[in-house]
Image (spheres, rainbow, N blue to C red):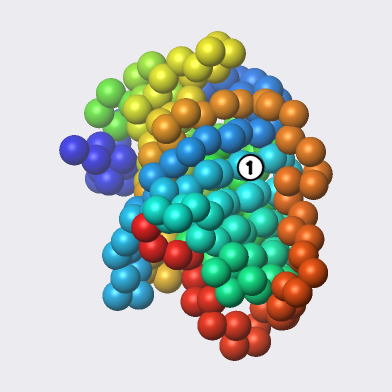
Amino acid sequence: MNIWACATSHAVNVPLMEAHDLTAFLSDRDTAIHSMESAALMEYSGGGEHFKARENIIVRRPASMRVEVMSALGVALVVAADAGQVAVFDPGKNTLMRGPASEATLQRYARIPMTPDAAVRLMLALAPDSAMLAFAPNSMTEVGGGKVLTYHEPGGVIDELGFSGEGNLEMVRERLADGRIGYEVHYSDYRKLGDGFIFPGQVDASFPKTGATVKFRYENPSLNQDVPDSTFVLAPAPGTRKLDLGMDSGAGGAARG
């Protein structure tokens, strides 16, 4: 049962002072977690497509990510984003494509319609913005056994953070100024890692504006490893065909496992 779907219809207001422990917990995580590496099973639905793929994922704050899509023969596609640029390498066609790291390019190749910084925070189970945690929420409501903190952002956007009874972040939802949901993320299967962090094993995200849903099942997440800058740089080998993203590359998007 998705208790967070009831946040606007069956919620009970509670004193804002009770929100302090939740925001302090999330702020501490925001300061402590810098990167994550894991093998993962990705499941995607949208645009008439539905498929699963095995991936190796590396993300590093503030805005770097690398996704290797695997097939039975090895690496089928590599997507590397670092702040303003994304590179996509198709080994089967020996083709390297580069272009701006926009929501459109990440949607096409990594299946996440977000900018790299937002995508990294989503995959690390952090609040949408570090700065928001320095302020008290506009309201707090109790939903089932959990609590929802509501933040009013500039431009009429509303961010909602849902916490379980144990204090883990289980839901992030963005409501646009017109009331529509921009995106919604659910975190589940929290586990204690070897370094002592509590981290979700599963991330489920939906993006109504594109009609897409994507699920990541982390298999062996490791936090705060030393990730060199070169991880997010794809250099062409001799003979590699180079293209600009936006041209008809024929790569099509994430390979299917």
Q: How many marks?
A: 1
| Occupied quadrant, residue 191 | top left
Residue 213 seen by the camera: no
Residue 51 seen by the camera: yes
Q: Position of residue 194 (x, y in %)?
A: 53, 13
Q: Position of residue 8 (x, y in %)?
A: 31, 46
Please identify the quadrant where the N terminus is shown.
top left
Residue at coordinates 54% horizontally, 76% vertically from top-left? 251
Q: Amino acid at mark 1?
A: Val
Residue at coordinates 48% horizontally, 48% vertically from top-left? 55
Q: Position of residue 35 (x, y in %)?
A: 66, 34
Q: Is residue 163 left or right of residue 113?
A: left
* Residue in the foreground of this view, choosing between 9 and 108: 108
Residue at the left extreme of this rendering: 1
Residue at coordinates 60% horizontally, 34% vertically from top-left? 36
User: Relative to 50, does residue 223 appear above or below in the rendering?
Assistant: above
Q: Is residue 195 left or right of residue 218?
A: right
* Residue in the foreground of this view, choosing between 206 and 20: 206
Q: Position of residue 21 (x, y in %)?
A: 54, 16
* Residue in the foreground of this view, choosing between 235 and 248: 235
Pointer 1: what residue? 59
* Residue in the foreground of this view, choosing between 144 and 187: 187
User: Relative to 127, does residue 108 appear above or below in the rendering?
Assistant: below
| Occupied quadrant, residue 86 | bottom right
